[in-house]
Amino acid sequence: GRKAPVDCTEAPIEHEYLHYPWGEWWIEEGGFKNATQVDINGWNPLHHACDFSTCSVRGSLSAIDLLKTHICNVNARTTGPRPPQYTALHFASDGSDKASRRGEIVELLLNNRAEIEAKEKHGNTPLLLAAASGCLEIVKYLRQKGCNAWAKNKKAVGALAKASGASPAVQEF
């Protein structure tokens, strides 16, 4: 997540915990009463789980479980300054850890009617964030689902320019 140290590692999850009710755990551990409650930064449990999914299997499992077992507002936006106006799809698209099942999270979010062209405060869409992060899987999936490949943020920067600092595979795509 945004607060995790760069050298932070996660203990492996035993097979029997893969089907644990992670969404409920995330709500309880986060001090929330339900899946739609927000904290002082306007983040709900799904925002936190999708943000944490960029570096944690537990975060990924929590986001997946929340989407499958709770009524979540997938298009709710953060109201605090860091990061401003993000939806769960922005969080799931913004990060480079390819081993955390974020593709599955993005698919579930879109299946639950997440806005594929949602723009955060700076005008970045989920595609622009995925391109900048170098996550080819997410870029391909968003394109397959029909996102605007030519979208630009408020500084008129598009996906190709965003990908210039990312992986060569994203640049080629």
Image (cartoon, grey):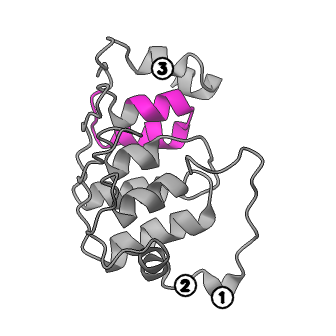
Which numbered circle lies on residue 16?
1
**Residue contact at pointers 2 and 1, CB within 8 angstroms:** yes
**Chain part drawn in magenta:** 128-148
Q: Position of residue 86 (x, y in %)?
A: 33, 43
Q: Position of residue 144 (x, y in %)?
A: 35, 41
Q: Nearer the viewer, residue 39 or 167?
A: 39
Which numbered circle lies on residue 162?
3
Residue at the top extreme, as displayed: 156
Mark 1 or 3, nearer chain start: 1
Q: Disc 1 on helix, strand or loop?
A: helix
Compared across the picture, whether 4 is left or right of 66 comes to: right
Q: Disc 2 on helix, strand or loop?
A: loop
Query: Per the image, is 130 magenta?
Result: yes
Residue type at tag 3:
Lys
Residue type at tag 2:
His
Residue at 34% across / 28% down in the picture? 124
Q: Which residue is mark 2?
A: 19
Query: Per the image, is 166 magenta?
Result: no
Q: Nearer the viewer, residue 6 or 163?
A: 6
Q: CA distance from mark 1 to mark 3?
A: 40 Å
Which numbered circle lies on residue 110?
none
Q: With respect to residue 35, does 95 lie above or below?
A: above
Compared across the picture, whether 55 is left or right of 63 comes to: right
Residue type at tag 1:
Glu
Q: With respect to residue 31, does 83 lie above or below?
A: above
